């Protein structure tokens, strides 16, 4: 498993990436490439299941990076066929922090009408209750993952084919889910009724692909066709193409707004908008809302870069690379010793002293979670001789945990849950600290009138505390929702 790093735990972490293809020779190789492009969505483990008419279902699940496992010819030869799905994981449910191989997806189930494999991105908010019920009725769980509930619900369904059993199962599930699944002949994709997590459709030659993000379609040379709609199920075969089904009661969509801010890769497209361009626009809005007299705008690399470019453009303050990232550090560095660990953020980031010295610096970052990294970066900038440090944050204060497939600290650990903006400024020890407003963020993602408070256009629960799906399991464990205003 790749080692955790002291500075990686100060960001929200996207949970999983999913990918599938049908109708191409050696489909598993395409899935491996797709998962490689989705590695930013989960670095802990990955898995691929393929099907070949003569060799049946085959699977491989491994800890670590896709490139370190699914590039071996020997391994890939064990995954033959023209149909395959895959998953990269950062654990959000299950044995968090001590993942076992049995928790690594895709999961596989053998039914009377044939086998099916399933890969899930998101989080089932009623999984504890479902699991209890299923165990009481005789289901034997193999993993600690919430996603396995879907397989057991499918096993209990009385429907005659696998897509219908999946519809049945997913109607019982609450929360956020994008699913890529396969039978012997079909590739299946589903998004939850609110469309919280992403899923897109691509075309490759005579075949089709499903992916969490469009950047993974690019890597295999697939053409982006469209997003799977919230509440839509697509059943795809090489022979008959895409059949669209609407198994759920229609609801207004609530896509995760944080995908725009941070999770998705900047070269992906969401809702026909470039993620890079949206982030640049967030920087423009941020500059309009939170101006400051300064000499230099610097991104906190890499995720703050497009917003910093937008901030500099709108404010007229020169843009510069005041912080340089060590490109070869990444997450693959050898297990840090305590001494190296204490070097903290300096392992990954270094200050460009010649540029910073004597300047009033605006630092643009995508978010503040615990604030530990922000403090260290501020110290590095001041040590390098900056005259002033002003933080500008491209998201509103993160004051609530996410229960929809993103790893967030407990609420008490979120800086914005316990401190006002001024208190956070003093805690970080900077000259000023400002966040984009929720309305400003909505404008930047294309909602000209901002957020509709009566019926928000996105999920923004980690900022607003307004959860579009009740987090039943967590409430059972004592989580307190925000009181109605
Ligand atoms: S709570 Fe935040 S991170 Fe989670 S789905 Fe909603 S917007 Fe995204």
Image (tube, rainbow, N blue to C red):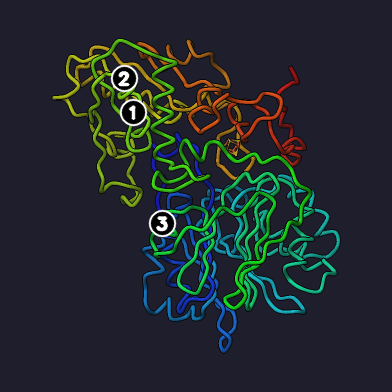
Disc 1, SS: helix
Q: Quadrant of residue 39?
A: bottom left
User: Which is nearer the N-term, disc 2 or disc 3?
Assistant: 3
Residue on which the image places disc 2: 362
Mark identifier at residue 308: 1
Residue on which the image places disc 3: 37
What x and y, as percent, mark residue 137? 86, 62
Q: CA distance from mark 3 to mark 1?
A: 24 Å
Q: CA distance from mark 2 to mark 3?
A: 31 Å
Q: Residue at x 34, y 16 (%)?
A: 390
Marks 1 and 2: CB-CB under 8 Å?
Answer: yes
Disc 2, SS: strand
Q: Does residue 46 show up?
A: yes
User: Which is nearer the N-term, disc 1 or disc 2?
Assistant: 1
For the C terminus, the quadrant is: top right
Residue 344 lies, with reference to residue 246, above or below; the image says above
Marks 3 and 1: CB-CB under 8 Å?
Answer: no
The residue nearer to you, when weighing 222 against 46, is 222
Q: Residue at x 74, y 32 (%)?
A: 478
Residue 300 lies, with reference to residue 94, above or below; the image says above
The residue nearer to you, when weighing 281 against 77, is 281
């Amino acid at each position: 498993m790749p080692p955790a790093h002291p500075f990686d735990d100060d960001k929200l972490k996207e949970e999983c990436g999913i990918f599938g293809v049908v109708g191409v020779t050696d489909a598993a190789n395409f899935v491996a490439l797709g998962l490689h492009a989705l590695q930013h969505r989960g670095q802990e483990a990955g898995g691929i299941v393929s099907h070949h008419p003569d060799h049946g279902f085959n699977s491989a699940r491994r800890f670590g990076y896709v490139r370190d496992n699914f590039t071996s010819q020997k391994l890939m030869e064990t995954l033959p066929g023209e149909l395959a799905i895959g998953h990269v994981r950062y654990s959000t449910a299950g044995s968090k922090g001590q993942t076992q191989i049995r928790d690594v997806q895709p999961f596989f189930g053998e039914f009377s009408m044939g086998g099916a494999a399933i890969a899930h991105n998101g989080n089932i908010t009623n999984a504890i209750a479902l699991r209890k019920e299923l165990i009481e009725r005789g289901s034997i769980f193999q993993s600690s993952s919430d996603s396995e509930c879907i397989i057991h619900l499918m096993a209990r369904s009385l429907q005659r084919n696998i897509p219908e059993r999946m519809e049945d199962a997913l109607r019982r599930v609450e929360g956020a889910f994008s699913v890529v699944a396969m039978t012997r002949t079909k590739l299946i994709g589903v998004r939850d009724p609110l469309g919280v997590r992403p899923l897109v459709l691509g075309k490759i030659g005579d075949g089709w692909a499903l992916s969490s993000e469009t950047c993974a379609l690019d890597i295999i040379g697939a053409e982006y066709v469209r997003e799977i709609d919230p509440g839509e199920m697509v059943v795809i075969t090489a022979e008959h193409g895409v059949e669209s089904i609407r198994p759920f009661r229609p609801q207004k969509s609530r896509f995760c707004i944080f995908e725009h801010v941070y999770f998705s890769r900047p070269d992906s497209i969401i809702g026909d908008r470039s993620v890079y361009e949206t982030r640049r626009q967030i920087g423009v809005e941020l500059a309009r809302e939170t101006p400051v007299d300064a000499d230099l705008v610097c991104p906190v690399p890499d995720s703050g870069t497009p917003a910093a470019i937008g901030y500099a453009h709108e404010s007229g303050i020169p843009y510069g690379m005041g912080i340089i990232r060590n490109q070869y550090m990444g997450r693959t560095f050898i297990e840090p010793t305590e001494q190296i660990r204490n070097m903290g953020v300096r392992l990954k980031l270094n200050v460009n002293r010649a540029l910073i010295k004597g300047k009033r610096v605006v630092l643009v970052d995508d978010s503040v979670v615990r604030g530990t990294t922000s403090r260290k970066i501020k110290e590095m900038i001041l040590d390098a001789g900056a005259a002033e440090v002003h933080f500008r944050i491209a998201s509103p204060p993160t004051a609530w945990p996410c229960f929809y497939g993103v790893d967030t600290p407990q609420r008490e650990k979120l800086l914005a849950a316990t401190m006002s903006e001024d208190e956070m400024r003093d805690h970080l020890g900077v000259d000023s600290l400002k966040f984009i407003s929720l309305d400003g963020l909505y404008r930047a993602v294309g909602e000209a009138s901002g957020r509709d408070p009566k019926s928000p256009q996105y999920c923004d629960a980690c900022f607003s505390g307004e959860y579009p799906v009740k987090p039943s399991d967590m409430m059972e464990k004592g989580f307190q929702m925000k009181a109605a205003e």
